[in-house]
Structures are given as C-alpha cells and as structure tokens.
Amino acid sequence: MILLQNCEVTAMYLSRVELDLARPTTMQALVAPQKLHGAVESAFAGERRRRLWRLDRLGGKLYLLLLSEDRPDLTGIAAQFGSANGAGQAETRDYTPLLQRITPDGVWQFRLTANPTKSCPDPKGAAARGTVRAHCTMAYQQQWLLQRAEKHGFALTPDSFTVTASRWLRFAKSGDRRHPVTLLSVTYEGVLRVTDPQAFCQLLTQGIGRGKAYGLGLMTVMHRG
C-alpha cells in the first residue's frame, strides 16, 4: 500500500496495446469481448483477478487500455490482436504519479466507458428478485453518471459532459448460447471537479458500474489545471 498526498492505493500500471483492425481475430473480439477478457487475464501470472480494461479509438487507430496492480506481459495480446509488423504495439507506464496529483477541487478531463443500468422491481412483490435493465436514452445515461458523482468523489454539471458513443454488446459466455450476455456500452467524455480525492482514486482504480470483465467501468483522466 502506498500513501499518497490525498490517496491511499497500491502501485498501479496503465498499459496500452495497439490493435490491428485488419486481423480477423481483432474483428471477432470486437463483437465477442470475452475473447479480450481472456487475453487480458492471460497477461498476468498467478491468481486470476479482475482487471479494468477498455477499447479506445484515437486518431483512426484502435487501442486496448489496461489498468492493473501488476506489470503485465503484453506479448500475448500483441501477438493475437496486434499489428503484424510490430509497430507501436504495446507500452506500460507507472500510474502512481497521476494518482498522486489527485487533489481537492482539481479539474480533470475524463473519458469513461460504462454500463449505465437501473434496477426494476418485480411486479409480483418486493420479495421477488427484480431485473437489471440498461438506460437506453442519452438523457437517462447522463443522469446515471450525475447521480453517482458525489459517491465517487467528483462533481459534474449537465453541460460539462456528453455521451459520445453507445453500442450493444451481445455474446455467448463460455459457449452457452442459451443464455447470452447483453450489455450496453456507453462512452462519456467531459470535464469534472474532484470533491473527495480518496473516493475518486478508488473510482479510477476499481471502476464503476457493471460489466467490468468485458471492457466497461474504466475512467481515464487528463489534468486540466
């Protein structure tokens, strides 16, 4: 455990792997994120733990971002999904210096891909198990994040962020086609202000919402001063 100025966290690493959109394996993984989940877990030795990851499109390129407590071995991911010529495939950086800069009232530009959901009670009664449903409209997707801001140590206004992408993920988990997994992936971008550094660091390192195994829940930030 490392005690930072405002956060108490373990050492963290942020990795990035450029993926090759011309490879069939990459295209298959885009519609079946459990393939990337397996590749991410294979990048670490020892006990299996859930790591945060996300797909990002930047400058016409596709990247896999990975946040972890241990430094990963990215050669397997690069070999399976990366460019055949090896150009710009993988890099890992110490994430701790960024966490050390999290202070009260700090202003940060952020990107988050998450699964905004709501719990719907069963009409048969309070004792019956309800269902979890995705927020399908942009207004409710934005409201979902606004409602969670205080708990996770940051402040937002409705005009300080927007939804930049939304798509459904439908795939069979572990080959079970009778019970497919359906998740709504929503990407948010905007500017926030830190209100509780410890809670905000916990969000950055542990994620938010459901579907973390399938590339959802990871927020990344860039300091705005």
Image (cartoon, rainbow, N blue to C red):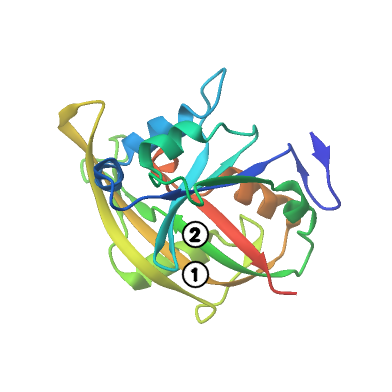
Residue drawn at x 50%, y 78% is 158
Under circle 2, the secondary element is strand
Outermost top residue: 46
Q: Exactly how many numbered labels are in the figure? A: 2
Alpha carbons under labels 1 and 2: distance apart: 7 Å
Does the residue at mark 1 contact the one at mark 2 (Cβ under 8 Å)? yes
Q: Quadrant of the C terminus?
A: bottom right
Give the side of residue 36 with respect to residue 125, left or right: right
Give the side of residue 100 with respect to residue 216, left or right: right
Q: Amino acid at mark 1?
A: Glu
Give the side of residue 96 with respect to residue 45, left or right: right
Measuring from the top left, give residue 41's x and y in whole percent.
Answer: 47, 29
Q: Amino acid at mark 2?
A: Leu
In the depicted view, which residue is nearer to us: 49 or 79?
79
**Which one is earlier in the sequence, the residue at label 1 or at label 2?**
2
Measuring from the top left, give residue 83's x and y in whole percent.
Answer: 40, 47
Which residue position is annotated with label 1? 189
Measuring from the top left, give residue 69's x and y in whole percent.
Answer: 65, 35
Outermost left residue: 178
